[in-house]
Image: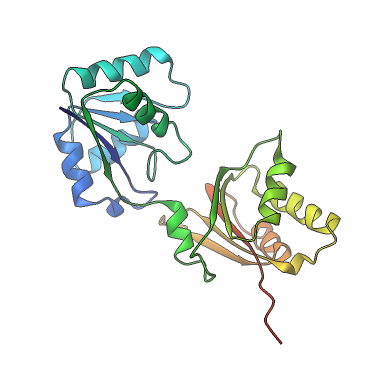
Amino acid sequence: MSKFYIVATPIGNLKDITLRALEVLREVDFILAEDTRVTKKLLLHYEISKPLISYHHHSKLKKTDEILNLLREGKNLALVSDAGTPGISDPGNKLVEEILNNNLDTNIIPIPGTSSILTLASIAGISMDRFKFLGFAPTKKGKDKFLKEVLESDLPVIFFESCHRILKTLQRIQGLVTSYKLQVTSYQLVIGRELTKKFETVYRGTVDEVLTQLKNSVIKGEFTVIISKIKKSRT
Protein backbone atom coordinates (compact mmCIF):
# COMPACT_ATOMS: atom_id res chain seq x y z
CA MET A 1 0.00 0.00 0.00
CA SER A 2 1.30 3.43 -0.96
CA LYS A 3 1.00 6.47 1.29
CA PHE A 4 -0.14 9.95 0.35
CA TYR A 5 0.60 12.59 2.97
CA ILE A 6 -1.07 16.01 3.16
CA VAL A 7 1.64 18.02 4.89
CA ALA A 8 1.08 21.44 6.47
CA THR A 9 4.06 23.79 6.12
CA PRO A 10 4.84 27.14 7.80
CA ILE A 11 2.86 30.21 6.74
CA GLY A 12 5.90 32.39 7.35
CA ASN A 13 8.17 31.46 10.22
CA LEU A 14 10.08 28.32 9.22
CA LYS A 15 10.26 27.22 12.86
CA ASP A 16 6.52 26.53 12.80
CA ILE A 17 6.91 23.23 10.96
CA THR A 18 6.26 20.13 13.06
CA LEU A 19 8.76 17.37 13.80
CA ARG A 20 6.38 14.88 12.21
CA ALA A 21 6.17 16.93 9.00
CA LEU A 22 9.98 16.99 8.74
CA GLU A 23 10.10 13.23 9.33
CA VAL A 24 7.59 12.61 6.54
CA LEU A 25 9.35 14.93 4.07
CA ARG A 26 12.60 13.08 4.70
CA GLU A 27 11.04 9.64 4.18
CA VAL A 28 8.76 10.00 1.13
CA ASP A 29 9.85 9.19 -2.40
CA PHE A 30 8.53 12.41 -3.98
CA ILE A 31 7.19 15.76 -2.79
CA LEU A 32 4.39 17.47 -4.74
CA ALA A 33 4.75 21.24 -4.47
CA GLU A 34 2.58 24.17 -5.47
CA ASP A 35 5.72 26.16 -6.34
CA THR A 36 8.92 24.11 -6.33
CA ARG A 37 11.03 27.26 -5.81
CA VAL A 38 9.24 28.04 -2.55
CA THR A 39 9.42 24.46 -1.32
CA LYS A 40 13.13 24.20 -2.16
CA LYS A 41 13.84 27.01 0.31
CA LEU A 42 12.08 25.10 3.08
CA LEU A 43 13.86 21.85 2.21
CA LEU A 44 17.27 23.53 2.02
CA HIS A 45 16.71 25.12 5.43
CA TYR A 46 16.18 21.67 6.95
CA GLU A 47 18.78 19.93 4.75
CA ILE A 48 16.23 17.68 3.04
CA SER A 49 16.94 16.44 -0.48
CA LYS A 50 13.99 14.92 -2.29
CA PRO A 51 12.69 14.94 -5.89
CA LEU A 52 10.04 17.64 -6.38
CA ILE A 53 7.03 17.44 -8.68
CA SER A 54 5.11 20.60 -9.53
CA TYR A 55 1.38 20.36 -8.81
CA HIS A 56 -0.89 23.42 -8.77
CA HIS A 57 -4.19 24.90 -10.01
CA HIS A 58 -3.06 24.84 -13.64
CA SER A 59 -1.68 21.29 -13.67
CA LYS A 60 -3.12 19.30 -16.55
CA LEU A 61 -4.80 15.89 -16.44
CA LYS A 62 -1.54 14.30 -17.65
CA LYS A 63 0.23 15.46 -14.48
CA THR A 64 -2.55 13.99 -12.32
CA ASP A 65 -2.21 10.67 -14.18
CA GLU A 66 1.55 10.67 -13.55
CA ILE A 67 0.96 11.15 -9.82
CA LEU A 68 -1.68 8.39 -9.71
CA ASN A 69 0.72 6.03 -11.49
CA LEU A 70 3.43 6.70 -8.90
CA LEU A 71 0.97 5.70 -6.18
CA ARG A 72 0.01 2.57 -8.15
CA GLU A 73 3.73 1.68 -8.20
CA GLY A 74 3.78 1.84 -4.42
CA LYS A 75 5.62 5.16 -4.11
CA ASN A 76 4.98 7.32 -1.06
CA LEU A 77 4.19 10.97 -1.80
CA ALA A 78 3.81 14.17 0.21
CA LEU A 79 1.74 17.13 -0.93
CA VAL A 80 2.65 20.62 0.28
CA SER A 81 1.38 24.07 -0.62
CA ASP A 82 3.46 27.25 -0.59
CA ALA A 83 2.28 27.92 2.95
CA GLY A 84 -0.17 26.43 5.40
CA THR A 85 -2.38 23.37 5.07
CA PRO A 86 -2.98 21.91 1.58
CA GLY A 87 -6.51 21.20 0.42
CA ILE A 88 -7.86 24.56 1.62
CA SER A 89 -8.28 27.02 -1.24
CA ASP A 90 -5.84 25.02 -3.38
CA PRO A 91 -6.13 21.94 -5.65
CA GLY A 92 -5.05 19.44 -2.98
CA ASN A 93 -8.55 18.15 -2.33
CA LYS A 94 -9.09 17.58 -6.06
CA LEU A 95 -6.09 15.25 -6.05
CA VAL A 96 -7.42 13.40 -2.99
CA GLU A 97 -10.74 13.04 -4.82
CA GLU A 98 -8.96 11.52 -7.83
CA ILE A 99 -7.15 9.03 -5.61
CA LEU A 100 -10.44 7.98 -4.03
CA ASN A 101 -12.30 7.82 -7.35
CA ASN A 102 -9.61 5.56 -8.82
CA ASN A 103 -9.87 3.16 -5.86
CA LEU A 104 -6.11 3.18 -5.37
CA ASP A 105 -4.58 1.08 -2.63
CA THR A 106 -3.34 4.25 -0.97
CA ASN A 107 -3.51 5.41 2.61
CA ILE A 108 -4.26 9.16 2.72
CA ILE A 109 -2.65 10.64 5.83
CA PRO A 110 -3.02 14.23 7.15
CA ILE A 111 0.02 15.82 8.78
CA PRO A 112 -1.49 18.83 10.59
CA GLY A 113 0.21 22.12 11.24
CA THR A 114 -0.17 25.83 10.68
CA SER A 115 -3.10 27.54 9.00
CA SER A 116 -3.61 31.28 8.64
CA ILE A 117 -7.33 30.74 9.23
CA LEU A 118 -6.92 29.31 12.71
CA THR A 119 -3.89 31.47 13.48
CA LEU A 120 -5.95 34.65 13.10
CA ALA A 121 -9.08 33.14 14.65
CA SER A 122 -7.12 32.30 17.79
CA ILE A 123 -6.35 35.99 18.45
CA ALA A 124 -9.57 37.51 17.09
CA GLY A 125 -10.93 38.46 20.47
CA ILE A 126 -14.45 37.58 19.38
CA SER A 127 -16.38 34.33 19.71
CA MET A 128 -15.08 31.90 17.07
CA ASP A 129 -16.96 28.84 18.36
CA ARG A 130 -18.65 28.79 14.96
CA PHE A 131 -17.62 30.63 11.81
CA LYS A 132 -17.78 30.56 8.01
CA PHE A 133 -14.72 30.24 5.79
CA LEU A 134 -15.24 31.47 2.23
CA GLY A 135 -11.76 31.12 0.72
CA PHE A 136 -10.44 33.80 -1.62
CA ALA A 137 -12.71 36.74 -2.39
CA PRO A 138 -13.61 36.89 -6.12
CA THR A 139 -11.43 39.27 -8.10
CA LYS A 140 -14.22 40.85 -10.18
CA LYS A 141 -17.26 38.77 -11.15
CA GLY A 142 -19.51 38.05 -8.21
CA LYS A 143 -17.63 40.30 -5.81
CA ASP A 144 -20.66 42.20 -4.53
CA LYS A 145 -22.66 38.97 -4.17
CA PHE A 146 -19.76 37.48 -2.18
CA LEU A 147 -19.51 40.53 0.09
CA LYS A 148 -23.29 40.63 0.56
CA GLU A 149 -23.11 37.04 1.84
CA VAL A 150 -20.34 38.11 4.22
CA LEU A 151 -22.39 41.03 5.58
CA GLU A 152 -25.57 39.00 5.95
CA SER A 153 -23.92 36.16 7.87
CA ASP A 154 -24.87 35.80 11.53
CA LEU A 155 -21.56 34.00 12.04
CA PRO A 156 -18.08 35.54 11.81
CA VAL A 157 -16.71 35.13 8.27
CA ILE A 158 -13.08 34.48 7.35
CA PHE A 159 -11.77 35.02 3.82
CA PHE A 160 -8.51 35.74 2.00
CA GLU A 161 -7.68 38.86 0.02
CA SER A 162 -4.59 40.02 -1.86
CA CYS A 163 -2.57 43.15 -1.13
CA HIS A 164 -3.65 44.53 -4.52
CA ARG A 165 -7.34 44.43 -3.66
CA ILE A 166 -7.67 44.74 0.12
CA LEU A 167 -8.36 48.51 0.13
CA LYS A 168 -10.92 48.30 -2.68
CA THR A 169 -12.61 45.34 -0.99
CA LEU A 170 -13.00 47.24 2.29
CA GLN A 171 -14.26 50.28 0.40
CA ARG A 172 -16.86 48.11 -1.31
CA ILE A 173 -17.89 46.69 2.06
CA GLN A 174 -18.21 50.25 3.30
CA GLY A 175 -20.41 51.12 0.31
CA LEU A 176 -22.60 48.05 0.70
CA VAL A 177 -23.09 48.72 4.40
CA THR A 178 -24.18 52.27 3.55
CA SER A 179 -26.55 51.08 0.81
CA TYR A 180 -28.15 48.64 3.28
CA LYS A 181 -28.67 51.64 5.58
CA LEU A 182 -26.69 49.95 8.34
CA GLN A 183 -24.24 51.58 10.70
CA VAL A 184 -20.62 51.02 9.68
CA THR A 185 -19.87 50.44 13.37
CA SER A 186 -22.20 47.42 13.36
CA TYR A 187 -19.32 45.33 12.01
CA GLN A 188 -15.93 44.60 13.51
CA LEU A 189 -12.91 43.49 11.55
CA VAL A 190 -9.74 41.65 12.44
CA ILE A 191 -7.24 41.51 9.58
CA GLY A 192 -3.90 39.72 9.64
CA ARG A 193 -1.00 40.59 7.34
CA GLU A 194 2.24 38.61 7.05
CA LEU A 195 1.18 36.37 9.95
CA THR A 196 4.13 34.74 11.80
CA LYS A 197 6.60 36.76 9.71
CA LYS A 198 8.92 39.59 10.74
CA PHE A 199 6.45 42.31 9.78
CA GLU A 200 3.33 40.59 11.12
CA THR A 201 0.55 43.13 11.60
CA VAL A 202 -2.98 42.74 12.96
CA TYR A 203 -5.56 45.46 12.27
CA ARG A 204 -8.68 45.70 14.43
CA GLY A 205 -11.74 47.94 14.44
CA THR A 206 -14.74 49.01 12.37
CA VAL A 207 -14.58 49.20 8.59
CA ASP A 208 -13.72 52.91 8.77
CA GLU A 209 -11.06 52.40 11.42
CA VAL A 210 -9.33 49.52 9.64
CA LEU A 211 -9.39 51.39 6.32
CA THR A 212 -7.61 54.31 7.99
CA GLN A 213 -5.03 51.98 9.54
CA LEU A 214 -4.33 50.28 6.21
CA LYS A 215 -4.00 53.55 4.32
CA ASN A 216 -1.31 54.59 6.81
CA SER A 217 0.70 51.37 6.56
CA VAL A 218 2.67 49.34 4.03
CA ILE A 219 0.33 47.04 2.13
CA LYS A 220 2.20 43.85 1.27
CA GLY A 221 1.60 40.13 1.40
CA GLU A 222 -1.62 38.15 1.66
CA PHE A 223 -4.38 39.27 3.99
CA THR A 224 -6.62 37.07 6.13
CA VAL A 225 -9.85 38.84 7.04
CA ILE A 226 -12.38 38.20 9.80
CA ILE A 227 -15.57 40.24 9.75
CA SER A 228 -18.32 39.89 12.31
CA LYS A 229 -21.49 41.68 13.29
CA ILE A 230 -21.14 43.51 16.58
CA LYS A 231 -23.56 41.98 19.04
CA LYS A 232 -25.70 44.58 20.79
CA SER A 233 -25.44 44.35 24.55
CA ARG A 234 -28.65 43.71 26.46
CA THR A 235 -30.08 46.62 28.43
Residue 35 position, x and y percent, is 39, 30
Residue 88 position, x and y percent, is 44, 41
Colour setup of the view: rainbow
Locate the C terminus by quadrant.
Answer: bottom right
Pick out the residue farthest to the top. Answer: 62
Who's the residue at 70% across and 35% down the image?
A: 140
Q: Is residue 195 something one can see in this rendering?
A: no
Locate the N terminus by quadrant.
Answer: top left
Horizontal side of residue 68 vs 182, given as left or right = left
Residue 56 image-quadrant placement: top left
52 over 229 or under it: above or below: above
Q: Nearer the viewer, residue 116 or 87?
A: 87
Residue 2 position, x and y percent, is 18, 27
Residue 227 position, x and y percent, is 62, 59
Q: Nearer the viewer, residue 81 or 157?
A: 157
93 over 222 or under it: above or below: above
Question: How many numbered marks does the figure carry?
Answer: 0
Residue 216 image-quadrant placement: bottom right
Horizontal side of residue 1 vs 167, given as left or right = left
Pick out the residue farthest to the bottom. Answer: 235
Who's the residue at 30% across and 54% down the image?
A: 16
Who's the residue at 64% across and 38% down the image?
A: 138
Horizontal side of residue 117 vs 38, given as left or right = right
Q: Is residue 235 something one can see in this rendering?
A: yes
